[in-house]
Amino acid sequence: IHFVGSLENYSITFDGNKALLSAQSIYATPIYNCTLEFPDGVNNTNPFIDNPSAYYDHVFNITPSDSNNVSDDQIISFPVKIIICECNAGTDCDLNNGYKISTTPGKTVSFNANSVDSENHTSPAVVFTSIPSNSQKLRIGAQENVQWIGKMCDTLEFQIYGEENVSFNLFLSTFMSGTPTIVKVTLKPCDPGFVLIPNADGYLLCDCSSFLTSLNLGCDVGTGTVIRSDNKWIGIYNNGTYNLSAYAYTCPADYCKYNLTQVSLATSDALCDNNRHGLLCGQCHDNMSVIFGSSQCQSCSSYSLFTILMYAVLGIVLVAFLFVLNLTVTQGTIYGLIFYANIIQVNESIFFNQSFLNPLQIIISFINLDLGFPLCFYEGMDDAAKTGLQFVFPAYLLVLTITFIVFCRYCLKSNSSRQRLNRFSHFIGKRAVSVLATLIYLSYSKLLRTVIQILTIATVYTENGTSFRVWFYDGTIRYLEGKHLLLFIIAMVTGLFFLFPYTLALTLIPIIDKYSDHNRLFYWLNQKANLLKPMNDAYYAPFKGVWRCWLGVRLWLLFILYVPTPFYSSDRPYLLMYIHSIIMVVFLFVQAHIKPFGELQNAEGSKLKLYFAEFYSWADSIYLLNYTILAITVSYLLSNDTIVQHLGITVASLVGLSLIMYFVTVLYYVAAVIRRVRISVGRNERCVNSTLPLTNSQADDIYETIKNTSYIDTDVHYKIVTENDLREPLMDT
């Protein structure tokens, strides 16, 4: 640059210059080493003499951005060299020998690069790609021969075609570059599930194997992934000799990532969720264990003693809760709640997010005799052990209740002189049958879920044409072999000797009783059923005589809703919710029409009968209607991919309303207990301490006291009884 006059007087401004390949001011050959020439007679004592580059910054109003005082945004020059950005990030890269990448034929590879000029200043460039001319079967995509990169690190992508197990050099250059940048490429064998075939242009690439196409699965050649629909499991199975591509039509809910649509069989464990891996994602990672209250795997220590103590305490609390509040099936108010909680629990993978604790889920789980929060039992526990332990807690509750009954029976027969112990024994005996019936009813759904879980089977198909059956919840366990055989035997015994007879009995006993006078077989069966008459009366108390079999119908409905759940809750949950909503609408309509709940028999009459019949009917219908609305809403949300935000709000709102009604019911029973205690105090002052049977006048006085109070005793149906009438039938056996 030649000038005359003062250097400070020259200034050029560029405004809005945004050329793609140029800077905002100058695009030219390198100017950073230019020097200033001063004509004869011009004073060369100038502040820019010692820093010529700063002169250009001044002339072009450039704000210095590097040590050379030259802004890369304003002045650039011709690129001469391609730089691989990954090499500057500290990766294993040697530019002298070439940047190394490995891929499979047809898969898209990418890396970041930029270009510099002769002074190592970044400069945009058009990148030309070439491969050795003697590589007849190696190709890169036509659109990838020429690519553009800017001044920052931009991504270069290549889809490379060729044979397997081949290495070659990929050359990157610009217009002005002398020595090209070398990228060393290795084409590996195709990933599992892919085979080497020519495309329409004759280029060799790894594409879907016939095994995957026969299953109507697609492949993304560029990413080397299999396109997965619904919740199908795709992965690798080792037959002891080599790895095979494997496939199953569904994966257990919460074991696989439902929304993951593309899976690389080279890293098939990425399909698994909650720290799981293996066939059907049925195993935990190393040093992790299956836990109670969740399908997750976690690092555990042996908390066996703590867990056992916690379950023992929870069992005692639950039994005491039922005894004290008398919140049993005899009252009828909890039939709807239990049915509601049973269906919510079996679909918890749809309704609740397993990644965090949900108070609603905890309450629903407690009603189903489950934990709603994660808890370790022992280190190394697997799904087989966890499933087998599901039988223990219901058995413990039944043993605990029977122990109470036997203890109180012993106390009564021993004629103990301790008044408090006698009162406790009478208290337990008075409610023993209803509490025992309630615990059996609560255990029914838990045992039914466990039996269905054990019996659920999955078939795994492999690419060599073979298939084998495995347990659905742990694909490494063959069906009816090893651990599963033991679980299968326990499940069959439970199903054949408890679940099926229990359901059948509650359905047919009312029918047998109705026709026992007209059929000798029914008469004989009715005599056998009368052996459990106290238990049957506890179950049928809330129902009309003609519709006592409706309780059994509800159990069959629960079975129908449970059976498809393992498959559809993980594969097509929206379809499962549609099915549930249709079934519940029909059931709700039928129940509203027949009105199966009956009248509470008391000495007073029709007002109390009508009140309880309506209360049972409305309370039960609210629970059923709530779940029907929930199923319809959730099915719509799932089918429209609006799961994340709206599903949680919907479940929280509807389940929360049902639980609020449940807590109101509990408060009612708490108030009833308080009222009962007050009345009992008044009675004690008059005749309760008497060891003789009541006289007629005493009975009339007590009856008048009860009749004139607003309190409704929820223990028993009102009638005046003698001392022997107050004894529980189970206490005399």
Image (cartoon, rainbow, N blue to C red):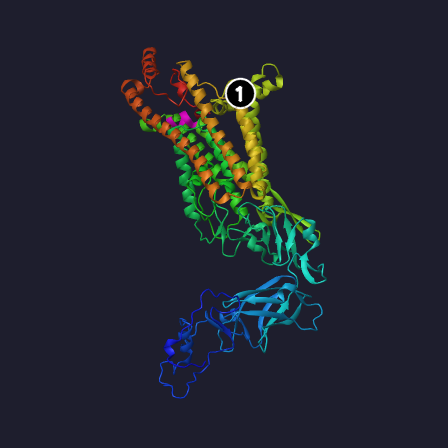
Which residue does the numbered mark 1 point to in the structure image?
A: 594
Q: Nearer the viewer, residue 636 or 729?
A: 636
Left or right: where does residue 90 sit relative to residue 417? Answer: right
Q: Position of residue 169 (x, y in %)?
A: 63, 72
Magenta stretch contains residue 365? no
Outermost residue, bottom side: 40
Q: Does residue 502 appear in the picture of this structure?
A: no
Outermost residue, top side: 697
Q: Which quarter of the picture shows residue 501? A: top right
- Tell me the magenta residue range: 427-433
Q: Position of residue 94 (x, y in %)?
A: 55, 75
Q: Is residue 376 above or below residue 392?
A: below
Residue appearing at x 63%, y 68% in the figure: 186
Badge 1 marks a residue whose secondary structure is helix
Q: Is residue 623 above or below residue 570?
A: above
Q: Which quarter of the picture shows residue 418? A: top left
Q: Is residue 328 above or below residue 469?
A: above
Q: Is residue 454 above or below residue 695?
A: below
Q: Which quarter of the picture shows residue 171? A: bottom right
Q: Nearer the viewer, residue 552 or 423?
A: 552
